[in-house]
Image: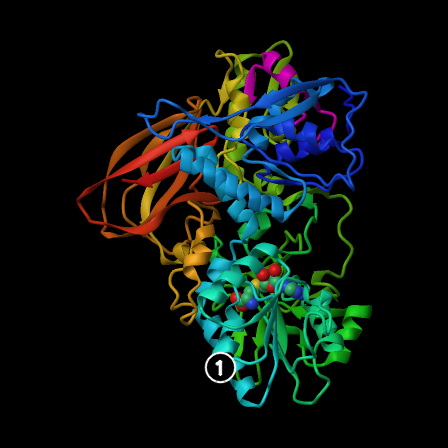
Amino acid sequence: METPFEEWKFIEELAANQHDFIRTPVSADLCGTAIFGILLDYPVIYHYDMASFNGNMSGIPLNVYTAAAEFVKNAHDKQPLSAKLFSFSVPKALDGYNDSISPCALKSYIILNGEESAEEARGIFQEVLALNPGSLRALRALESTSNLLVSRWHFPMLNDERRNSLYRDAIDAALKSGVQSVLDIGTGTGFLSYLVWRSNPAGVYACEMNTTMYKIASEVLKKNNADVQLIPKKSTDLLIPDDLPERVDLVICEIFDAGLLGEGALETLSHAWENLINPSSNSRVIPSSADVFLALVESPDIAQSSCGKKTCLLKEEPYDSEVLSSLPRGFRILSTPTVILHLNFCDPEELVQIVKNGKKSLVDIELKVSGVPHAAVIWFDLHLNEHLTITTHPSDSGCWEQAIFPLGSIDPVLQGNVLTLAIDVCDYISVELASEPNPRLTPFPSPHLKVINDDLYLGQIQLELKQLLGDLNQGDIKILDLHDFPVAAIVLKECGLKSPCTVYTVETLCENVYGEDVKVISSEQAKQERANIVFHDPISKDGTLNPYVLSLLQQFPKETKFQPSHVEAWGYLFESQRLEEMSRLVSDERTLGYAVAEFLNRFSVSYHVDLHESTLPKLRCSDDFYICDIFPCLDYSGVDAITVTTSGSAVGIMVFFRLCYSSGLLCTKDVGHHWKHMCCLFPEPTKVVQGTQVGVLYKVSQGEIYLAIQ
Ligand SMILES: C[S@@+](CC[C@H](N)C(=O)[O-])C[C@H]1O[C@@H](n2cnc3c(N)ncnc32)[C@H](O)[C@@H]1O
């Protein structure tokens, strides 16, 4: 159906991609109110600026709805408490589509105007949760806003005591050499400014461009009695004398991602030298320089999401990042690590040159061991001064991941052979093979490649298809594929099973970019199509449930033949220092006495996703236990007693799923699958004793899973 709004496609795309939050620029013809209404599933707020946005609905037939929410605080309350009221309108032409969109799209709300409104939303979700503490939806909405407002990497970064101590030592050394005034660019929680202030309380300035981090830093610095002039701005917008009274002697910063320059470090430091730092010979920057290393790496896991015999990677990001040592099937370094770039952060001319003109080079890398060079990987040594260095080497990387540049190779290269790589340094570092890519390969996004290369998964679908074709050997066989790309059609083609099948996919799930073999239909049509088999994957790649697919499945007639026909959630209790460090600030000792945990941990959440379960350092405290069915039964809650097999300090429950097909069973925990894992975290590590039983409370609702210990 033709839709009256271009934005509709945009909504569908976002819905299919399972976005928790939708940030959208407000354009003149975007009907924010309509989008809001379509997605509504919960108290939602939206903002738009009337000066720049004319949300004009005149001339469009509308259905107007009013939403109210009532909550009973406890069973004795006679009078329910009401939450805020919202009213919204949906163009008549779009009404009816909302069934298929809302359950997935709304985990919470649309942000039309950035962080400010997310903070307001957080307040509302907290309010709702206080009124109705059992609401899983409110909890997840609150936690989604926390994830949005404070990036998760702040936790491992501040827990990294070695990083923190090295910065402290470098700052102390600079202050001893007579530096007077200091600017901390990108202060985050205020930690580095605090270290400066502790040694030299005069003349400490800090700037932070992220509004939430700025507010956190203000609170934490105050709590620590640190007198730091905090400026809520990006450093490149700072003005002298309005923001800073004069240029400073020392700039300190830690604005380095896995690829070193991806957070804009070159532009930031080049601007600082031109505008914010005294041009005297004693002025400096911490860190003073960096060496970037590159090595060729063989890794089945990188290969799975980046190459194939007929496929190649559709590049959407300049690089990916991973902790190499956490890859489930390991990795081999095939070449001697080579320095591909030395950057002197105290040489303004060099920085300006690179910012203006970039820096391109060709580098020959010889293989020291034969193997398949699936990727070039980079890491770096960050020299804080001439004596103190932080390394992000794969065996010793602290809180940093390594930057991965997939090369798409599938053939082994013999020891002694040389690959030429093109290195381009501009806003960030990019690395690719100097030779032309093979034009006959079909580009796929990385998550799709991961599925296509999941042999066990495709093998299972193939078995089911063969069985179906054997059972029904005449007539047009209708296959409905609810993956986000038509996996069944690919399997049919691969094994020459095409005729006499028609594969249908649902438009809100899947763009029809994979050939004419597939018919794209609406979810309404899909439900009425009476397919002979419906393939689905109710687990998202990050290990969470896929609420959109689960809610769609619920709407089919009972007699529909689904594959998998049954999906179970399983878990185990475990202790893991590493996971704790990734999800909350362990103590203020990690930040060398800077009292920040209390503030930052307000943004910690009750789950962690995207985990490599098999390589996470951990101690298992129980055997695997069955939690509940997630399909076909959708909503479930209960308490079960679990036996502790090993004493420990349990941080949470690792969750995995079993998918039951008519001819076999797949477990998401098996290495080589396209799924990663989620775990439900307890608010505090909980002591569990071998041989005793603990009560595990579970709740599954509308595609969300929540586990706690009683
Ligand atoms: C990796 S964190 C480091 C935080 C803190 N300095 C520490 O070491 O704990 C980087 C912070 O810098 C901020 N940032 C990055 N570039 C900036 C810039 N040019 N001006 C202001 N803030 C910046 C980001 O918003 C982020 O909060």
Residue at image location 65% in from the left, 15% down from the top: 525
Is the residue 110 above or below the residue 612 in the image?
above
Is the residue 434 above or below the residue 661 in the image?
below
Residue at image location 39% in from the left, 23% down from the top: 79
Is residue 296 visible to the viewer in this orientation of the structure?
A: no
Question: Residue most toward the top?
Answer: 475
The residue labelled by disc 1 is 199
Point out the image quarter for the N terminus: top right
371 relative to 605 in the view: left or right: right
Residue at image location 61% in from the left, 31% down from the top: 487
In the image, which residues are magenta? 507-534
Q: Position of residue 129 (x, y in %)?
A: 43, 37
Is the residue 608 above or below the residue 222 in the image?
above
Coloring applied to the structure: rainbow
Q: Position of residue 500 (x, y in %)?
A: 65, 16
652 relative to 481 in the view: left or right: left
Is residue 581 visible to the viewer in this orientation of the structure?
A: yes
